Image: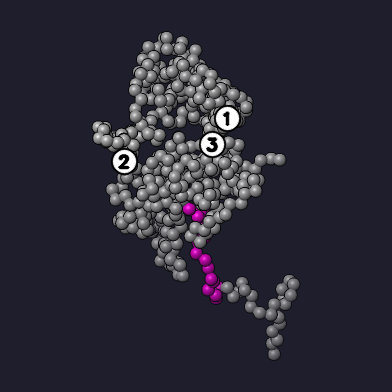
């Protein structure tokens, strides 16, 4: 007679079948493949998408007379900065002046000044005696109220210029006081240096004289060509005729794309498709990655990305670093019908800290079943695609959306060949000699800002917590 003895383990006697032994005979319950790179993609969800059947979207606008409202760029070598000569064409007075040799000579006349916080670089009412190009730092424009009190009228930052009227009007005076807020580097062209150069450069003198003598183009406060309208009259006066002039060279947005070639071995597709289809799972994760790239491009693409397509007049700077309620109010006041803010999660946290300091607790609002932080009833959507610099600064975007409201819109084209999802198609490329199946996955998209004030940006937003 044989007696079976219990199986002995190191710690105790096992009385039943182990899970390790049972697992080969069981079917596990498993999840689909997970992916950490999937974000909420609120920008993609919040933008209204416009069908672009031709692959190109043209933004027709009224004729605009304003020029020279761009950003000046520099070459910085260590602690020394110099302006790129052709960048001087961003100044309105030099917009159409293309003599690179003279521009290079003019650029060399600018002198660098490194200023401490609190330095007054221009004082209201004094003669305007210099052109200032801001390389780095922040400056505050300070005016005078009705009763002599100081008022903050705006900020200047890197890439801005001020005092350019010096080039064409020797009798101009400073309209405001300009004071540095942070350590600031500027390049300065003094009136005296300019006069010396004009004495030896007839072409430059002729350019500036022509600009000074040119009659001002009638325009509204947005820079658009005026439409002549009479009102408040009586009787039968002779009315002036008018017409609405259009921009002769409107901007066109071509659909951009993101693509990837998905490869799956035929053995995997044949043998390992139960209970989950391997090709479908590979395709699902590839599409998620394409959609993440799409949202990144909508924010950062140098051609159509929102950060690069904001009009310079719609960019403002924080006054103290962190995003305060005052900064958000200023950003909100620059356009009608702001539909949303877009900010990095760190910027949202920094704004929350500033509100808490003031004893403010804004109510969140509900969007698609999610409670979203808000300011003045406008949702602040998180977007991790907005970059945070090494100095822990970022930007906050505010926008009006939709074609009807002349806002920001997304562009795509549906009903394309082999469409898998709207404006995304999957095309079978074939099977190579190594039994690898290939699929071309393509996603088409872009974004357009219909009028400049539809999009605004708050720059130099400090997200780091300040040390006590």
Q: Residue furthest right?
A: 11
- For discs 1 and 2, the disc positioned in front in the rendered view: 1
Write down the region rendered in magenta.
24-42
Asked where in the image residue 461 lies, by quadrant, the reply is top right
Q: Which mark is residue 60?
A: 2
Which residue lies at the image location 64% right of the left edge and 45% below the top edge? Answer: 358
* Whether residue 80 is situated above or below residue 284 in the rendered picture: above
Q: Residue 386 at what x, y percent from top left?
A: 51, 45
On whether residue 392 falls in the magenta region, the answer is no
Sequence-first disc among 1 and 2: 2
Answer yes or no: is residue 78 visible.
no
Mark 1, residue position: 147
From the image, give the main secondary structure of the stretch colored magenta: loop
Callouts 3 and 1 close, C-beta under 8 Å: no
> Percent x, y for residue 69?
42, 30
Q: Are marks 3 and 2 in contact (CB under 8 Å)?
A: no
Q: Position of residue 118 (x, y in %)?
A: 62, 27
């Amino acid at each position: 007679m044989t007696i079976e003895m219990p199986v002995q383990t190191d710690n105790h006697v096992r009385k039943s079948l182990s899970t390790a032994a049972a697992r080969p005979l069981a079917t596990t319950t498993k999840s689909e493949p997970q992916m950490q790179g999937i974000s909420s993609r609120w920008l993609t969800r919040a933008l209204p998408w416009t069908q672009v059947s031709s692959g190109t979207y043209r933004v027709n606008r009224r004729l605009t007379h304003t020029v020279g409202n761009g950003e000046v760029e520099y070459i910085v070598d260590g602690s020394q900065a110099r302006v790129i000569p052709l960048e001087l064409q961003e100044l309105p007075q030099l917009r159409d002046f293309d003599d690179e040799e003279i521009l290079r000579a003019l650029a060399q006349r600018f002198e660098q000044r490194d200023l401490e916080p609190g330095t007054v670089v221009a004082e209201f009412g004094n003669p305007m005696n210099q052109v200032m190009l801001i390389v780095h730092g922040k400056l505050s424009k300070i005016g005078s109220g009705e009763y002599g009190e100081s008022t903050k009228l705006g900020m200047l930052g890197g890439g801005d210029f001020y005092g350019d009227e010096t080039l064409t009007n020797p009798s101009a005076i400073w309209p405001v006081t300009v004071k540095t807020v942070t350590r600031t580097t500027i390049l300065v062209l003094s009136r005296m240096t300019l006069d010396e150069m004009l004495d030896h450069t007839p072409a430059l003198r002729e350019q500036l004289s022509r600009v000074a003598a040119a009659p001002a183009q009638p325009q509204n406060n947005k820079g658009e060509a005026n439409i002549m309208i009479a009102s408040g009259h009586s009787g039968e006066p002779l009315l002036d005729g008018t017409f609405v002039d259009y921009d002769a060279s409107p901007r066109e947005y071509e659909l951009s794309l993101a693509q990837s070639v998905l490869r799956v071995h035929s053995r995997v597709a044949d043998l390992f498709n139960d209970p989950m289809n391997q090709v479908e799972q590979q395709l699902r994760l590839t599409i998620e990655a394409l959609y993440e790239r799409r949202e990144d491009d909508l924010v950062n693409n140098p051609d159509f990305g929102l950060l690069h397509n904001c009009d310079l007049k719609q960019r403002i700077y924080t006054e103290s670093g962190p995003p305060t309620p005052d900064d958000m109010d200023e950003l909100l006041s620059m356009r009608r019908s702001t539909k949303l803010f877009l900010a990095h999660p760190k910027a949202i946290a920094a704004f929350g800290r500033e509100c808490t300091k003031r004893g403010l607790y804004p109510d969140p609002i509900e969007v698609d079943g999610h409670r979203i932080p808000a300011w003045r009833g406008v949702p602040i959507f998180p977007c991790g695609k907005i970059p945070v610099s090494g100095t822990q600064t970022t930007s906050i975007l505010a926008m009006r959306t939709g074609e009807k409201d002349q806002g920001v819109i997304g562009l795509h084209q549906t009903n394309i060949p082999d469409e898998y999802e709207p404006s995304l198609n999957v095309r079978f490329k074939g099977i190579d000699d190594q039994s690898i199946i290939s699929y071309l996955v393509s996603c088409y998209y872009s974004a357009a800002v219909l009028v400049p004030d539809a999009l605004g940006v708050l720059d130099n937003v400090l997200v780091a917590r300040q040390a006590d």
